[in-house]
Amino acid sequence: QVQVQESGGGLVQPGGSLRLSCTTSGRTLANFRMGWFRQAPGKEREFVASINWNTGDTSTTESMKGRFTISRDSAKRIVYLQMNSLEPEDTAVYYCSARHVLFDTYEYWGRGTQVTVSA
């Protein structure tokens, strides 16, 4: 089992920045991929970015490249999502998730953290 908990959300003005944190516990994250997803009101959940815990290899949705950066602190077992140049369209609940690298489906999910971008 892997437990994940998001934090760092809040209200930010357009053009501002936020850094989300995903604190993990439970089994070792070796051979896991950690992901960030988001879900805006009335929309389906969408993939934001992911990182291979072992190698640090990352993947980011094309439309968010250059603004969003995923990283990890292996010693602290924390995954970060740095979000810059935020836009109102980035308003959503952001979720952290984990899956074993052998599987395609993200199995472990947090409860999410709300990000609101508004003047």
Image: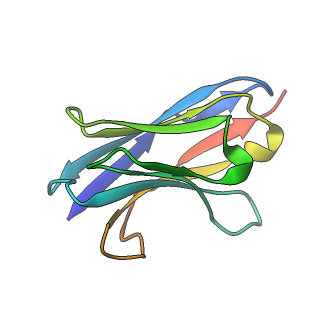
Residue 101 vs 73, above or below: the answer is: below
For the C terminus, the image quarter is: top right
| Residue 56 horizontal side relative to residue 14, left or right | left
Residue 69 vs 43, above or below: the answer is: above
Q: Residue at x 69, y 69 (%)?
A: 44
The front one of 112 and 49 is 49
Q: Would residue 15 be seen by someone viewing this image from the given angle?
A: yes
For the N terminus, the image quarter is: bottom left
Q: Residue at x 15, y 54 (%)?
A: 28
| Residue 42 horizontal side relative to residue 112, left or right | right
Can you give x and y, in whole percent of width and height, for residue 51 in the image?
41, 50
Q: Residue at x 67, y 35 (%)?
A: 66
| Residue 54 horizontal side relative to residue 86, left or right | left
Can you give x and y, in whole percent of width and height, for residue 45 in the image?
63, 65
Which residue appears farthest toward the right when viewing the image? 119
The front one of 11 and 75 is 75
Q: Quadrant of residue 97?
A: bottom left
Can you give x and y, in whole percent of width and height, for residue 26 in the image?
17, 54
Residue 31 vs 9, above or below: the answer is: below
